[in-house]
Image (cartoon, grey):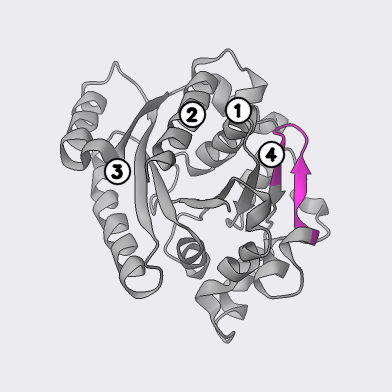
């Protein structure tokens, strides 16, 4: 059965989508069967995986509303060698349409249960807000991976996210836990980055992944070509870091 992880952070621009796409491709490179679920109406993970969000026959929107199943809506990322449950702007309407639906927080969980046996990992790219979409992601997941920059504002938002995860764990999903914190866009030349990184290690201990994703131009360029960074330039420091992170994640869940 698949391990289902949300990549979540209520703060925008912290590398959630970059992490989801590259972790998916990195895991695929080491032989794992992966499904990426794009839960963000912007559809950036869909595009980053090389899928045209303007030409979808079905998407996660139809899946959440019960008009399609995951098996018929998913597509293959030829550039990343993993499957994608894509998203586009239609998904923004799901927020309103789901309000009146039964069991609305667990629509994604029920849909993914039908294909979970086909994958080793299901990775969910959540939007940067605590919305009905994010709630569906958290209710479907076994754990949360939190990508964060080592800066002051990131620490401020982290406590809010941790509290949200605790509430969802207590009231809706007892399986949910924090798998780990991933330091992204890291610049070792900045004293603040070093200080915040040290604070995270002191406060969260072994919940902080050893892998650190550096600030990397090649990772930033890759989405415009529709190719995950780990495949766009496998020799780049960013690509190597995500492949190492994938291997570390596989090892970490063995001991869970």
The residue indicated by pointer 1 is 30
- Image-quadrant location for residue 73: bottom right
Q: Is residue 84 visible?
A: yes
Q: Residue at x 45, y 36 (%)?
A: 249
Figure check: 246 above or below 75: above
Residue 154: image tag: 3
Residue 81 on the magenta span: yes
The residue indicated by pointer 2 is 247
Q: Which residues are magenta?
A: 72-83
> How many angstroms separate mark 1 from mark 4 (CA)?
17 Å
Q: Earlier in the sequence, mark 2 or mark 4?
A: 4
Q: Where does residue 75 sit, x and y in percent of width and height?
A: 77, 49
Q: Where does residue 183 sit, x and y in percent of width and height?
A: 35, 33
> How many angstroms separate mark 3 from mark 2 (CA)?
26 Å
> How many angstroms separate mark 3 from mark 1 (CA)?
31 Å
> How many angstroms separate mark 4 from mark 3 (CA)?
27 Å
Q: Earlier in the sequence, mark 3 or mark 2?
A: 3
The residue indicated by pointer 4 is 49
Q: Residue at x 73, y 38 (%)?
A: 50
Instruction: Tell me, yes or no, whether the two marked residues, 2 and 1, touch with CB atoms within 8 Å.
Output: yes
Figure check: 79 above or below 71: above
Classify mark 1: helix, strand or loop: loop
Q: Residue at x 39, y 54 (%)?
A: 10
């Amino acid at each position: 059965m698949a391990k289902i992880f949300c990549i979540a952070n209520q703060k925008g621009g912290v590398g959630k989508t970059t992490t989801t796409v590259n972790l998916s491709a990195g895991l695929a490179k080491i032989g794992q069967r992966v499904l990426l679920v794009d839960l963000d109406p912007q559809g950036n993970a869909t595009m980053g995986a090389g899928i045209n969000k303007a030409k979808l026959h079905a998407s996660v929107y139809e899946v959440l509303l019960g008009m399609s199943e995951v098996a018929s809506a998913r597509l293959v990322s030829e550039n990343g060698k993993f499957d994608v449950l894509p998203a586009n702007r239609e998904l923004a309407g799901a927020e309103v349409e789901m309000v009146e639906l039964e069991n609305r927080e667990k629509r994604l969980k029920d849909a993914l249960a039908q294909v979970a046996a086909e994958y080793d990992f299901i990775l969910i790219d959540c939007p940067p807000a605590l919305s009905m979409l994010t709630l569906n992601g958290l209710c479907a997941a076994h754990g949360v991976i939190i990508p964060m920059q080592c800066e002051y504002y990131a620490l401020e938002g982290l406590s809010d996210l941790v509290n949200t995860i605790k509430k969802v764990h207590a009231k809706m999903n007892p399986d949910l836990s924090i798998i780990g914190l991933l330091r992204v866009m890291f610049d070792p030349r900045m004293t603040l980055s070093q200080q915040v990184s040290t604070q995270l290690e002191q406060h969260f201990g072994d919940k902080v992944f050893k892998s650190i994703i550096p600030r990397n131009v090649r990772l930033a360029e890759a989405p415009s070509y529709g190719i995950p960074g780990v495949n766009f330039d496998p020799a780049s420091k960013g690509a190597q870091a995500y492949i190492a992170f994938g291997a570390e994640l596989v090892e970490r869940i063995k001991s869970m």
